[in-house]
Image: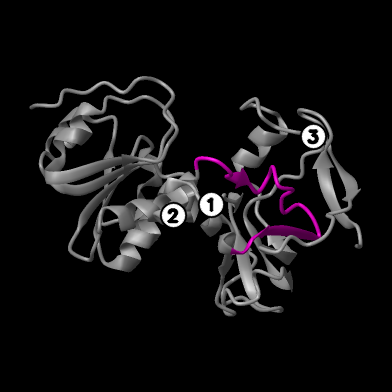
Amino acid sequence: MSMIRSYAAKEAGGELEVYEYDPGELRPQDIEVQVDYCGICHSDLSMIDNEWGFSQYPLIAGHEVIGRVVALGSAAQDKGLQVGQRVGIGWTARSCGHCDACISGNQINCEQGAVPTIMNRGGFAEKLRADWQWVIPLPENIDIESAGPLLCGGITVFKPLLMHHITATSRVGVIGIGGLGHIAIKLLHAMGCEVTAFSSNPAKEQEVLAMGADKVVNSRDPQALKALSGQFDLIINTVNVSLDWQPYFEALTYGGNFHTVGAVLRRCLFRPLR
């Protein structure tokens, strides 16, 4: 088996260095992918620096991978993928396939064998491998230079739209217009939704409107928030800081949902009744 050339951090906070490793024999359920492009996400930096306390070194980061299939394991031959096909790989590389979450179709919540792509040896490399079910077919005409973030930030904000059955008639608010928020706005606009962006930076207004938002609300203006009471079918929070959440809960319509994808580490306080 030939060696795979990569860039790896050999210690927490270390510089990325050329690193070659032997991937071993191709596992039956694995797909091997030749990497064309790989995005750089802040989570990659967190893993390199061991901010979450579970990094293992040498660590090959990279989980926004765009490439082509170059080999299929014996159990992956009939899964709809073929050599030469354009594919992507995101945060997860493996799941056990037999826990309750996997059997019910929620492999992302695998209870026993979930392995992040970064822990499995990530995309800052010539090639990488993943379980076939985590290798995502992509259209040939996709812009491969910029598509990588769809496999991380894109999936993160798209899942709530599926979970909450968002349609073209839905009214949706997005809190925070950063890496996640701007993708959410573009997806919602493409779906035909009425989109309201909540931002603490008024200077972003024209840029956010150009992305597809119908309205931009200053999240630091209590009166502006109060005026939105009972309007939204869904509000997606993309920020990782603690806010006064009560105005946003009150902005939901009957049966509306508040969904946070931002990792807010402090306790969230709100009144369940108005």
Q: Quadrant of residue 41?
A: top right
Q: CA distance from mark 3 to mark 2?
A: 32 Å
- Bin the neighbour count of mark 2 within 10 Å (Cα to Cα): few under 14, some 14-19, many 20 and up: few
Q: Is residue 29 left or right of residue 232?
A: right
Q: Earlier in the sequence, mark 2 or mark 1?
A: 2
Q: Does dot 2 land on a helix, a strand or a loop?
A: helix
Q: Quadrant of residue 258?
A: top left
Q: CA distance from mark 1 to mark 3?
A: 23 Å
Where residue 152 is drawn, which disc sits there? 1
Residue at the spot 84% in from the left edge and 34% down from the top edge: 10
- Closer to us: mark 3 or mark 2? 2
Comparing 250 with 33, the one in front is 33
Callout 1, which amino acid? Cys
* Quadrant of the rendering where the C terminus is positioned: top left
Q: Earlier in the sequence, mark 3 or mark 2?
A: 3
Q: Is residue 25 left or right of residue 145?
A: right
Q: Main secondary structure of the magenta part?
A: loop
Within the magenta stretch, is there residue 163?
no
- Closer to us: mark 2 or mark 1? 2
Q: Does dot 3 land on a helix, a strand or a loop?
A: loop
Look at the image and give the residue range highlighted in magenta: 111-132
Image location (x, y in percent) of residue 271: 16, 23
Q: Does dot 1 land on a helix, a strand or a loop?
A: loop
Q: Quadrant of residue 192?
A: bottom left
Q: Dot 2 corresponds to which residue?
A: 103
Image location (x, y in percent) of residue 76: 64, 70
Q: How many marks?
A: 3
Where residue 57 is drawn, which disc sits there? 3
